[in-house]
Amino acid sequence: MLRTTDDVLRWAGRLVDPPLRTAIGRLPEPSREVAELQLGWHHLTWGGVDAPAVSVRSALTLVCADAVGGDPHDAVPSAVAVELMHHWSAIRRDLVDEHADGTAWGVVGAEPASLGGEALLALAFDVIATGDPTRSSPARIRQRSGQASPDRAMLRVLGDTVQELLHGQHASLALRDTRPGATPAGEERTDLLRDTLAMVEQRTGALFGCACALGAAAGGGDPAQVERLRLFGVRLGLAVQFTEDLAGIGADLRRRRRSLPVAAAIAAGADELAALFEGRTRLSDADLERAAKTIEQSGAREWCRRQADELLSQALLTLDLASPSPAAVAELVALARRATATPR
């Protein structure tokens, strides 16, 4: 009997949340405080309600292990490492984007938050290297299912993803400093959209790809399966970012964040939107309403919807090529559709 998506997410939470909390508890203060703030375990950052413990990324990691014929329990350390790396990346992203509301650095300040983020990243590597998020004794290297330890390959996946995420942060800095209306050339508008797409692939795409690849590797998948499931994750991550950017147009405009709909509108010739982003004064409600209308009239919103749909289709095609088990593929498809669901 196939599980519902909600069942899969609850199952992933039961498996991943306890060792994730134990791993965070191993961090020394004040890094532990930063981590707990970033994960929303302090009500200061989530308005008095408990934060979601485990994301769709963790579920993808576990189900990808099942997809290649492995035991999802073997992928729990990988799922914990993915969550740790995500929150390190989120701290770096918030600092680069100067977004403080509801974040760790909005509470403790930029430098302490940055140091806490580095502690999360170091912990992610430790969890992958030892295969034990809960250890309190010196590191021990695991052996699973009579195989040679796959830790070297998994560490390479983790390391490559960190490099991609850092590259994406550099790209975000460059985009923030770009003045898209400074020259009228259409080539610059096209470059903005191209660079924004590349940045998204290096950030959200890389993280989702890592989640799927680590799960497949932990499940004993062969290199071809690991790579195909990684590509599935990358395409899904891109589709997810399109979805999130469509849902967050208003907030992104207020922060002058060059999201995918903004970049697409400017590429389509929305000079008025480009001029708004060049300014430094606070945008009024009228400015925000005009900017949102400009995005709609430029066709950027509809283009982004089509891109999200196309990327999801590409992800699902790549999933078919990975030849996973039928039950696992059904769950991966359902998770992918849940992650990219957006009001039409």
Image: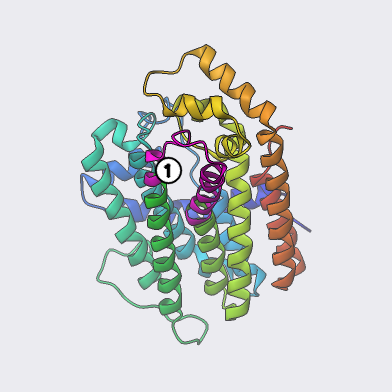
Residue tagged 1: 175
Q: Position of residue 101 (x, y in %)?
A: 38, 28
Amino acid marked by disc 1: Leu
Residue at the (57%, 62%) spot, across then down: 62
Q: Position of residue 233 (x, y in %)?
A: 60, 60
Callout 1: SS: helix
Residue at the (28%, 54%) spot, across then down: 118
Q: Main secondary structure of the magenta part?
A: helix
Q: Foreground residue, 309 or 209?
A: 309
Q: Position of residue 281 (x, y in %)?
A: 37, 19
- Residue 3 seen in the current view: no
How crowded pointer 1 is (Cα within 10 Å; few <14, some 14-19, many 20+) is rated as some
Q: Please, is residue 218 above or below residue 238 in the view? A: below
Q: Which quadrant of the structure image shows residue 48? A: top left
- Residue 46 seen in the current view: yes
Q: Horizontal placement of 285 versus 316: left or right? A: left
Q: Foreground residue, 166 or 300?
A: 300
Q: Is residue 179 magenta?
A: yes
- The stretch in magenta equals 173-202
Q: Which quadrant of the structure image shows residue 33? A: top left
Q: Position of residue 182 (x, y in %)?
A: 44, 34
Q: Foreground residue, 102 or 297?
A: 297
Residue at the (66%, 41%) spot, across then down: 304
Quadrant containing the C terminus is: top right
Q: Please, is residue 259 above or below residue 84 in the view? A: above
